[in-house]
Image: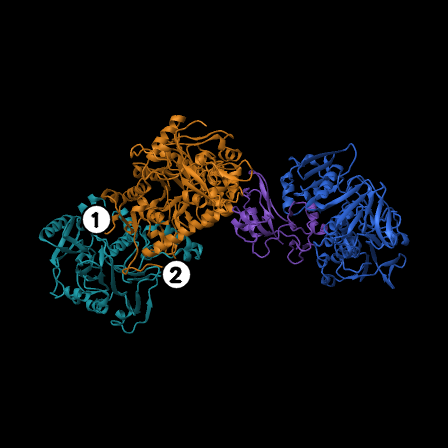
Chain colours: A blue, B purple, C orange, D cyan
Amino acid sequence: MKKYIIIGASAAGLACAEQIRKEDKNCSITVLTREAYLPYSRPSISYYLKGAVKENDMYLRSPNYYIEKGIDIVTSAPVRSIDKKNKTVKAGRKAYSYDKLCICTGSKPFVPPIKNINGKVNAYTFLDLASTKAVKAKANGNTKAVVIGAGLIGMKAAEGLSKICKSVDVVELSPRILPSILDEKSARSVKKYIEENGHIVFHLGDTVTEAKSNANRITSVVLKSGKELECDMLILAVGVRPETELAEKAGIKVERGIVTNPETMQTSDKSIYAAGDCTVSVDMLDGSKRVIALYPNAVYQGTAAGSQMAGGDIKLDGAYSVNAIDFYGLRICTCGLINAVGEQYSDRTVRSGDKYKRLIFENNRLVGFVLINASENAGIYTSLIENKTDLSEIKTDIFDTPSLFMFDKAEREKRLKGEIA
Amino acid sequence: MKKVYAKEELCLNCRLCEVYCKTAHSKTKDVLKANKYENPTPVSRITVYGDKMLSAAVNCRHCDNPKCVQACITGAMTKDEKTGIVSVNEKKCIGCMTCLSVCPFGCIKTGKFAVKCDLCQDEDEPACVKNCPNHALVYIDLGGAK
Amino acid sequence: MAVNYIPRRFTVIRDKNLCIDCGCCVRQCSNECHFFDGDGKTVVSDSENCVACHRCVDLCPTRALRIEKYVCDYRENANWTPQYQQEICRQAETGGVLLSGMGTPKPYPIYWDKILLNASQVTNPSIDPLREPMEIRTILGRKPEKITVEKKGKSTVEMPPQVIIETPIMFSAMSFGSISLNAQKSLAMAAKNLGTLFNTGEGGLHPDLKEYTDCAIVQVASGRFGVHKEYLNNSRFVEIKIGQGAKPGIGGHLPGEKVNVEVSNARMIPEGSDAISPAPHHDIYSIEDLRQLIWSIKQATDNKKPVSVKIAAVHNVAAIASGCVRAGADIVVIDGFRGGTGAAPTRIRDNVGIPIELALAAADQRLRDEGIRSRISLVAAGSFRCSADIVKAIALGADACYCASAPLIAMGCHMCQTCNTGKCNWGIATQRPELTKRLNPEIMHLRVENLINAWNHEIKEIMGGMGINSVDSLRGNRLMLRGIGLSEKELEILGIMHAGE
Amino acid sequence: MLKEGQVRIPSGCAIAAIIDRKGGLINGSEIIKSISLMHDRSNGLGGGFAAYGIYPEHKDEYAFHIFFENKEAHQKCEEFLFKHFNIDVAERIPTKKVASISNGPDIWRYFGRVNRVRMKNSRLDEGEYVVQCVTKINAAYDGAYIFSSGKNMGCFKAVGFPEDVGEFYMLDRYDAYLWTAHGRFPTNTPGWWGGAHPFNILDWSIVHNGEISSYDANRRYIEQFGYKCTMQTDTEVITYLFDHLIRHHGLPANVAADVLTAPEWDEIDRMDDEKKEYFTNLRAIYSGALVNGPFSVILGSNKGLLAINDRLKLRSLTAAVKGDRAYFASEESAIRIICPDPDKVWSVSGADPVFVPLEIENKEDE
């Protein structure tokens, strides 16, 4: 009976474990997680913070599910080291041997150099359930919160806190919010919408340089511009970096993240695979190497890794970013190369009211979209991007609500029969 | 598994499937109340695309390897191993619409949560199929894993 | 819009309390009576073009629509009725012949409604069709004078080709062109499952119907559209159409806009050209010419197919029928003047010909007087509305009946009588693809089958009541009929007694 | 009130028959005994008998039995007869006064041969010539009615119960190898002598129980071929059908029986190809001769006896055999009273007509 070890129990780790089970009914699957919880939805933490979901509903699967599937989730088991030669990992006091190993360690928060924040009890990260619980325990109607970072994590934290706290200030070094998912124009309108609906105060193009404290509690932060913001709660959400420490120590090739074969997710060690935010991906749309720290990507990678580890034939088709998020009811769907620069790119944009629709083309292909409150059938655009469909073959204009009638009869029939997924 | 398939050569573009889908997924289950008075207005899980010359109703394909399930960031979207039906757990769904962004058929609709076809699980036949006046929708098993 | 002196005919009434603005009616009305108001959301109606086809009424999910006759009074005049005035106005405008679809709506006597059926009481037991076999199988074709046998149980007679049908009801000629392929296919499928026949009309046989040739009657009409050797042989029998009850003495005209690729192929005429069937067959100017055509068809089909001759019920129909038999027709079809049509000049439809009841009775009796009735088959056509009409026709002497309007109604026809416009909302009398697809043969063949099966059941029920268990014993059994409110002369022609006699 | 022939009158009945296959003679008292047992099946409005082999001394001559209602009819009819036939004997049929039978016509019989010259001029064969003469008298001579026209056989019928009719005609004075008898129960009419059974044409005589619902279909079929159904009775039309099929179309009696009582299609569809073809052709060609409705019929002729029953077996008919004799009756008891110990008794089935051929060379048969 083969032994599979997976380090990390979030999106990639779980997808990997489930796929292994699909391919191999008789094997042992052990998932080691440093966290104290069974796999749960990381992106739900901001909804948990604002009370939109209960903790029970955050778990991705029921506890029974793991028993049924024979997936052994070992919680509170941080892995200390990987022994490539002997094919073992050490977690706590125990050593686990493996035939195939998958590293799904995800990312770690990037903590910027700020004076006087070390050891302060009211400085928090916002990345997992434990940190969210800590924030939720302390935040109340009198809290004046400062969030550093206006990326996805920072903005979701700010949205969650704005429902609880007295004030929320967001400090962002970049001149616009959500730079990873929004282009410049849409970022401005989203910012305006959030300001109006969430009473969040933005400090863009600025950064926190220093914290002032009373004993081990921060009382205010000083910005580079000289502004000083009162602060009872500081959320550090500048960004994340791939968690690659274990891999590095084990001698696995690491660049900005763990390097893998882009189809099989195999690392430089042939028994070891990696998936999820801890890896560096090659964006299929422009060939750039980068970390695509997005949930669907992690699942696709985990699934491919699991299949390959168990001898299956699922390969990763190629990574691209796709993201959907909402702020105060504003729905944002984005995909692909939204900030592409270059002569080969063109775009079409329509803005009306709080709707915004922008399609980005590279020659005859769709390579990206930003849809704000205009997400009808966005998945069809995604499939055009993913399949690198030559748009000259499509007779109708794809800009209005896309539908299967964009395609010719044969393609349409295939899709209606579910043959093209 | 049994799924709903559209025969575009028979679709009348009458869109009664939408009317009856809304009704089936309403509080009152009454065609008039559901479509005229209920608030919030029920969302149709099936949509007719096209024009009078060529049209077809599209609803969830309940794919063998559903992208929406893979992409769901909360575990709300699941494919039932027995029935093969892909459905949304509204308690878990946070309405992020990642599923909608990856569905290659455009079958997921926006509501407070993701809204999609559940094949009218409690009925012997989905409402859209039952009420299609020209049998342009059929509920049959053309293969495909559950 | 130019003033046309003619009030509209109907009013569409939309109950706003029931309308959910789903727009189904908007998308279903080919006459564009319904549309979204300026806001793009609210549905409103314009009654001007409504023909009362009920497509919107029947599909409306909340039953919010109703069609009412538009009542606009004229000064009362029993002679110059509104209809005549309106028709005059229409002709004053167009200078053209008035055209109509379907059978005459005029209140001529319908003898079916003046004939009553008999049932057994005491002296003769009625038969329960659920317990006893009740036979409606019918055999059409020319019969030899007598059987010859080697012995009991072994026949030595050489039989001319016979056509066995499992019900005395067949579907009358409706050409592809006048009706859609889907409509014709529905009839073909129903005919196949019912064990009866459909009729291609004069539109040729579409390749999609190849699998139904075993239940096809192929027609040879004055236009000879689509006629070739293979066509004649792809059939159960061949019908020479001399006339049509709805328009005796008149040819046909399928406007070029209905002649699309498919119709053009089936008819073997150029796409977009008008398909004109001349009034007469230009190779039949007399009875001996008919004999030659029948002979030619028999040659072309190797004597394997019976040949029928369809004539319109005109004044001397009995003699003409007898002539057809003597010219070699194996089956004579008589089409009464209430019969339907895709398009006919209104004046012809409403004024020319005689009712099928009288024509049938006269022809049957004439053939018997000449001792040739049992040698051939007699088929009646021209508006059979229910199974009782069929029973009465058989008792008057018909072997089988042709139905067309009834199956069309089963498929959705609402007798709006605008077949000639080509905008049939039910996908029947149209070639527009967006309309023809509304008629799904998979549904419609079942509806037609249900109808005929229901009629079969009723016919058996009626026969059982009469104490008859085979349609053979109903045929020509005029003692089973009594007239009600008919004159001596009418009774004499019908060959029946008055009720109470 | 319209009498039989002017209007069609439905009726119920009793029938009985005896045949000696070897031609042995049976006294008329036997058949009277049998039919009288079924007294309750008739209502006194008609009874009659047919007897074969009763006129051996005139066996080559036609025996015409005729009702005359008045002198004028008598005279005109005789004129016609003498013109068309060479009549040897003209006499009143001997009868006896019976209380229950009254108001009868004058009943005569004539023995004679056809006038050959006239027959040749008419270009008809002998049978057709005789039939047309009989039809002519019955249709055109008001008050004269030929009710028997065969050779070496005769019908005897009247308004009354059959046993009274037997006594009236003194049938115990006749011996025949084949007897048929009939008791009638017509509805709604005072019986008419001509309307009583058996019905006869040439050598065919028919007794019948029941009412055929296919009557008018059969009538209008047979009238195509020169017959005129003046009586509007089932027996008349059935007789004509047999006459037409056997005499005109040359069919054996059992094939003719198949025409009248053809099996159901369900049954035909299950038959082997040869049989299927046979019955399909029969039904196709003779659909107008299919007899439908409840009936049991006994057809007497100089070739034997044919008993048929309707396809659904709605009317009773029992058959029995004892030695050379076969017995038929609507009720079994009417057989057992004259033949208490038969070799075999069975109920005649609709699908299986019973034909009892006469096994002697019949000298009358040319």
Disc count in the image?
2
SS under mark 1: helix
Instruction: Assess whether mark 1 and mark 2 are in contact (beta carbons under 8 angstroms).
Output: no
Q: Nearer the viewer, mark 2 or mark 1?
A: 2
Which residue type does callout 2 highlight? Arg
Determine the image quadrant of residue D104.
bottom left
- Depth check: give the residue in front, D204 or B53: B53
Give the left or right position of residue D267, taking residue C207 as reference: left
Determine the image quadrant of residue D316.
bottom left
* Residue at the disc numbered 1: D132
Q: Residue at x 75, y 62 (%)?
A: A70
Q: Residues within 10 Å of mark 1 (few under 14, many from 20)?
A: some
Which residue type does callout 1 highlight? Gln
Q: Is residue A212 visible?
A: yes
Q: Residues within 10 Å of mark 2 (few under 14, many from 20)?
A: few
Residue D249 drawn above or below residue A177: below
Residue A120: image tag: none
Give me the chain letter of mark 1.
D
- Depth check: give the residue in front, C55 or A78: A78
In the rendered image, the residue lying farthest to the bottom is D341
- Residue A318 position, x and y percent, is 77, 45
- To the question of a shared chain for discs 2 and 1, the answer is no
* Residue at the disc numbered 2: C131
- Depth check: give the residue in front, A190 or D304: A190
- Depth check: give the residue in front, C370 or C269: C269
- Residue C152 position, x and y percent, is 36, 56
Q: Is residue D282 visible?
A: no
- Residue C370 position, x and y percent, is 28, 42
Residue C334 drawn above or below residue D150: above
SS under mark 2: loop
Determine the image quadrant of residue D203.
bottom left
Give me the chain letter of mark 2.
C
